Image (spheres, helix red, strand yellow):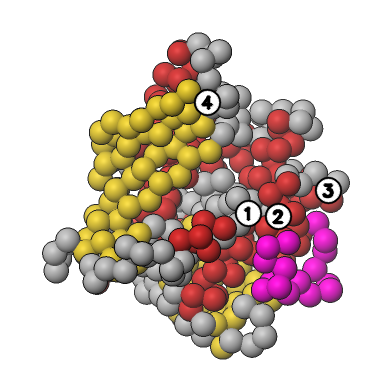
Amino acid sequence: MGPGALSEILTGLPGLDCRNLLVGTDTNDDACVYRLTDDTAIVQTVDFFPPMVDDPFLFGQIAAANALSDIYAMGAKPIFALNLLCFPSCLDLSVAREILAGGADKAMEAGCVIAGGHSIVDEEPKYGLCVTGLIHPSRILTNSNAKPGDSLVLTKKIGSGIIATACKSGLLTEDQAAEAFDSMRTLNRRAAEIATGFTINACTDITGFGVAGHVCEMAQASGVSIALRAASLPLLRYAPDLAQADEFPGGMYRNRDFFSDRVSVKSGVPEAIAGLIFDPQTSGGLLFSVPAEESGQLVDALREEVPAAIIGVVTERAGMPVHVVEI
């Protein structure tokens, strides 16, 4: 399926409208939220994918961090998760153990219990988690409340898609890709915790749709336009050179095609940087829409522990939802 296909399929299906369903599919948010009581809501998400690295333990870490990220993007705390594992019969079970051990390592770091799961035989390994979190209904973060005048703060560098592809094709060594792999297996937990001290109007995490796609979803859900500053994007090492050589994964082109009628790229933006804006990310950073007067303090606080940068501004709706500008 292409970007957005599942949301389009789900739209209008029966059984999706419920007074206790606080966040569903209508805004393409990162997870659903269901109210249990006046003081408690559960947040649920699921994500899994095939390996982007050869090391099974590292793959498990990255896949788990990616799934857990959706819970943090909603402002919630993960409490338990279920493993999802597809595994070929031709591989030794020790590989499966390492994948699951990597996932368990990240779940433990998140304070999240892995309570079971499900596995099937498949031709290609795939792994991820179905994660449940808790949150007070009044503290839910969504992608649909960005306000004109806000600044956009991103908490991880981008370029993981093109770097993982280059590593698979032998253009980069695993040592050269280490910065990207470390970024992908880093939980968004601390970024989310630090942000609780600030006014966060909207939040999402940057994953498969790339920066442009997820920013577009935020702009559309919020009824605003967003100007992304190409020169302000924090980039992983080697990403610019690989982009200049046009070594993008297929997902970048699919993202660009899907969002082309909603994302305007100004003529002064270099083609390589424009491609990185659409590069599909794995376990990317959180994107906060925060009042401009608080954005500098938020970035300073984040940079004590995680990379962070102001990458754009929110404006009243003007033309397309997203405008990528040079500066």
**Which residue is identified by label 4?**
122
Q: Which residues are magenta?
A: 257-272
User: Label 2's element?
Assistant: helix
Q: Amino acid at mark 1?
A: Gly
**First-in-chain label (1 vs 3):** 1
Percent across and percent down for residue 276 are 71, 55
Quarter-wise, where is residue 14 in the image? bottom left
Of callouts 1 and 2, the N-terminal one: 1
Of the residues tagged 1 and 2, which is closer to the observer? 1
Q: Residue at x 29, y 48 (%)?
A: 132
- Identify residue for label 1: 2
Q: Nearer the viewer, mark 1 or mark 3?
A: 1
For badge 2, the amino acid type reads Arg
| Residue 188 rendering spot, x and y as whole percentages | 43, 50
For residue 169, what is the image quadrant? top right
Choose the circle earlier in sequence order: 2 or 4: 4
Q: Nearer the viewer, mark 2 or mark 3?
A: 2
Q: Residue at x 34, y 45 (%)?
A: 131
Q: Amino acid at mark 4?
A: Asp
**Cα gap from disc 4 to disc 1, whole angstroms:** 21 Å
Q: Position of residue 312 (x, y in %)?
A: 60, 73
State the mark number for residue 141. Answer: none
Q: State left or right for residue 171 relative to residue 136.
A: right
Can you see residue 140?
Answer: no
Mark seen at residue 254: 2
Label 4's element?
Answer: loop
Q: Do tag 3 and tag 4 residues touch (Cβ < 8 Å)?
A: no
Q: Which residue is mark 3?
A: 246
Q: Earlier in the sequence, mark 2 or mark 3?
A: 3
**Alpha carbon separation for disc pair 2 and 3:** 15 Å
